[in-house]
Structure formats: C-alpha cells, structure tokens
Image (spheres, helix red, strand yellow):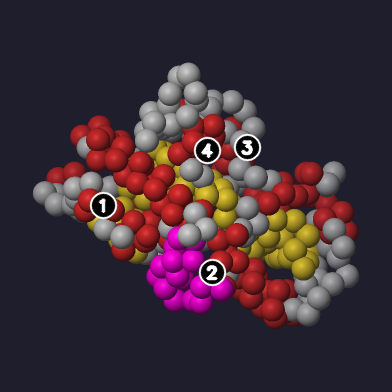
C-alpha cells in the first residue's frame, strides 16, 4: 500500500511551501490529490461519469505517486488529499495541517507480512530476520502482528529495507519474512516459491484508514462544496457494490492504473470500502481501531515512537466529519 512518506521529504516540501502562494490565493478550481490505492482510485468513477459536473462542483482531481502527492499538498499546490490517517498527522506535524472529513476505506488484506515456506505463523518469526521499511505503515502492521501473538519487536531482527525492494530481499533467502503492501506483496508471492501471507491488514481492521483530508481554510470557505463531494462518495461506493455496475466500476479503476480488470478485482477485494452509513459508525468517538479517533491515536503513538515527528498531536483537531446523521436512525442523510 502506498502510505507514509519520509520526514526528510516532508521538511523539504515544507520549506518549498514558503516560496509558493497558498492554494486559497488562486482563483481557480479546488484541487484534490489522489493516487494508486483502490480507495483513492475509486474517485475515477465519479470523474468519468461526470458526477462532479452534475453537482456543479469546480473540483479537479490530480493524479500523483503517493509521496509526491503529500509533497504537493505541503507545498500549497493542493486543497485536499486522499491519504491515510497516519500521514494526515505526519504532514500536519511537519508541514501543513489538514482535517479528515470522510473515510474512503480501510486496508482489508492488501498490507501483508509475507513469509517463506518454512514459517507457518507469526510465532515462528521469533529470532528471525524480517525486512520492512521502518517507520512506515507495514512496520506498524508487523508490530501489531507480533503483539497479537505474544511477541515484541525485541523478539525479532528487523532489517531496514525500502518497500519496493522487499520482494527481492525475500527471494535471496536472507530473511524469513517481509512487511509489504500491494502490488509489491503480489510480486513477492510470485517470485518466492512457497511464500505466503501469515498476517494481513484483514487481521487488524481499522489499523490503516484512507481518508479525504482537506485544508482547514478551504473547508471553512467551501464547506458546501466539500460536503457535496462527500455525498458523491456515497454514490461511488454504491456503484462499486451494485452487482449490475460492479464490473464497469472495476474496468474504470483498472484502466486508470494500467492493469487488467481481473487483477484489479483482487486488489479491490483487499480494500474495505466505507459507505456514508459506515462512515457514521467509524466517526463515533471512542477508543479502538473501529473508530477513526482510536485508530488515529494509535497512529500518533507509532509516529512519535519512530520519530516521524517529535510531539504527540491533538487528534480531535485533525477530524471534522462532513456527514449529516439522522439522530433517530443513526443513518446518514443522502
């Protein structure tokens, strides 16, 4: 999964931001950055179906590699991003604040701990070498897997490895497992005979949320536009989940990233899309990974521990749901 960017790049982008005009000084469309993750690519459906134009929204979606998108946001070139809740904290602490107004999805299997044939389960990793890009989201996934199986980081030997190099490292036989996201996870499984996932984000639902996060000033000035965009998300999820339109939705998404619909359908299956009604539940303020508040607090603890930034963030200041919920039924108003 394309998730956390490194702090060094964030600080550089923050410096560059001082040389650019803030996005709200531009007399043009609102700009949203999105990238190659199913919950983000899904916006392509609304783009191709012209649903934004139907609602008279002057919002332009701009395609990026994930890290470059975060850089562009910090540099003032975007008004909003489709990013993980942990990265919303990182960009806010190190460069430019944004607030989560809606959740697209949570990772439901696309992030994995992939092990060699001789490793049957997470407990077998004790004393073994594991390649993972430290400080990033699959490092967090690994720590969660270890904790759930009575182990800690001290019980394994972590080999710091760039995520896109982990499949090759696993193939060398020098490590017992890797922490990796799609499509690199699939590459590892194809390259290394007998390799298999022993823990995935499916085993920790809500650990990794993907969100729509908006510049606070833009949110204040254009709240109706952002609220309308959130309502369009509900239409997108319905289009994907409807058996009558599902295949067309997958074709649109697969075409955007340049792979076959059959392959993309597997990636989509590892992403739990969140409807607006689902959002209403996840935005309930409570501890635990089934709440955006609890999950983001967990991400904050991880980010501080691994020095993504120095001081804990005030979680509530990063969350501002744009959902109208019926107090009687608990359902979102469409």
Going from the N terminus, do you reach mark 1 or mark 4 first? Answer: 1
In three-dimensional space, the C-alpha distance between marks 2 and 3, rounded to whole angstroms, equals 27 Å
Q: Judging from the image, what secondary structure is the residue with disc 1 in?
A: helix
- Residue identifier under label 3: 289
Residue drawn at x 49%, y 23% as measured from the top left: 329
The answer to whether one can see residue 88 in this image is no
**Which labelled disc corresponds to residue 52?**
1
Image location (x, y in percent) of residue 175: 77, 70
In three-dimensional space, the C-alpha distance between marks 1 and 4, rounded to whole angstroms, equals 22 Å
Marks 1,2: beta carbons within 8 A: no
Q: Is residue 33 above or below residue 204?
A: below
In three-dimensional space, the C-alpha distance between marks 3 and 4, rounded to whole angstroms, equals 14 Å
- Residue identifier under label 4: 278
Marks 2,4: beta carbons within 8 A: no
Residue drawn at x 39%, y 31% as measured from the top left: 333
Q: Quadrant of the N terminus?
A: bottom right
Residue drawn at x 85%, y 44% as measured from the top left: 150
Q: Residue furthest top?
A: 328
- Residue identifier under label 2: 264
169 or 118, which is in the foreground?
118
Provide the residue span drawn in magenta: 245-262
In this rendering, position of residue 140 left or right of residue 3: right
Image location (x, y in percent) of residue 39: 48, 55
**Structural crowding at the residue carrying mark 1, measured as other residues with C-alpha within 10 Å and reported as few (<14), some (14–19) or many (≥20):** some
Going from the N terminus, do you reach mark 2 or mark 4 first? Answer: 2
In three-dimensional space, the C-alpha distance between marks 1 and 2, rounded to whole angstroms, equals 24 Å
In three-dimensional space, the C-alpha distance between marks 2 and 4, rounded to whole angstroms, equals 23 Å
Name the image quarter holding residue 225.
top left
Q: Judging from the image, what secondary structure is the residue with disc 2 in?
A: helix
Going from the N terminus, do you reach mark 3 or mark 4 first? Answer: 4
């Amino acid at each position: 999964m394309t998730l956390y960017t490194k702090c060094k790049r964030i600080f550089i982008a923050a410096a560059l931001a001082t040389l650019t005009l803030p996005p709200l000084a531009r007399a043009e469309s609102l700009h949203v950055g999105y990238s190659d993750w199913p919950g983000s690519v899904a916006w392509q459906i609304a783009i191709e179906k012209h649903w934004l134009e139907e609602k008279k929204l002057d919002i332009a979606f701009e395609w990026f590699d994930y890290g470059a998108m975060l850089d562009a946001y910090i540099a003032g070139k975007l008004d909003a991003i489709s990013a993980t809740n942990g990265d919303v904290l990182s960009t806010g602490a190190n460069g430019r604040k944004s607030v989560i107004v809606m959740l697209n999805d949570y990772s439901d299997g696309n992030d994995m701990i992939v092990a060699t044939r001789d490793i049957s389960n997470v407990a077998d990793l004790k004393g073994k070498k594991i390649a993972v890009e430290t400080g990033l989201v699959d490092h967090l996934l690994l720590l969660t897997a270890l904790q759930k199986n009575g182990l800690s980081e001290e019980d394994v030997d972590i080999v710091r490895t760039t995520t896109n190099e982990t499949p090759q490292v696993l193939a060398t036989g020098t490590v017992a497992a890797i922490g990796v996201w799609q499509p690199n996870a699939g590459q590892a499984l194809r390259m290394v005979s007998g390799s298999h996932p022993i823990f995935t984000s499916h085993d920790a639902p809500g650990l990794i949320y993907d969100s729509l996060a908006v510049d606070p000033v833009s949110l204040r000035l254009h709240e109706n536009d952002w609220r309308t965009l959130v309502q369009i998300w509900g239409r997108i999820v319905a289009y994907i989940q409807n058996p009558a339109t599902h295949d067309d939705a997958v074709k649109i998404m697969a075409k955007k990233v340049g792979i076959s619909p059959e392959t993309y359908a597997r990636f989509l299956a590892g992403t739990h899309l969140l409807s607006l009604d689902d959002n209403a539940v996840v935005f309930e303020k409570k501890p635990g990974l089934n709440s955006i508040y609890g999950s983001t607090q967990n991400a904050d603890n991880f980010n501080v521990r691994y020095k993504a930034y120095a001081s804990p963030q005030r979680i509530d200041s990063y969350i501002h749901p744009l959902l109208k919920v019926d107090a009687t039924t608990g359902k979102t108003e469409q």
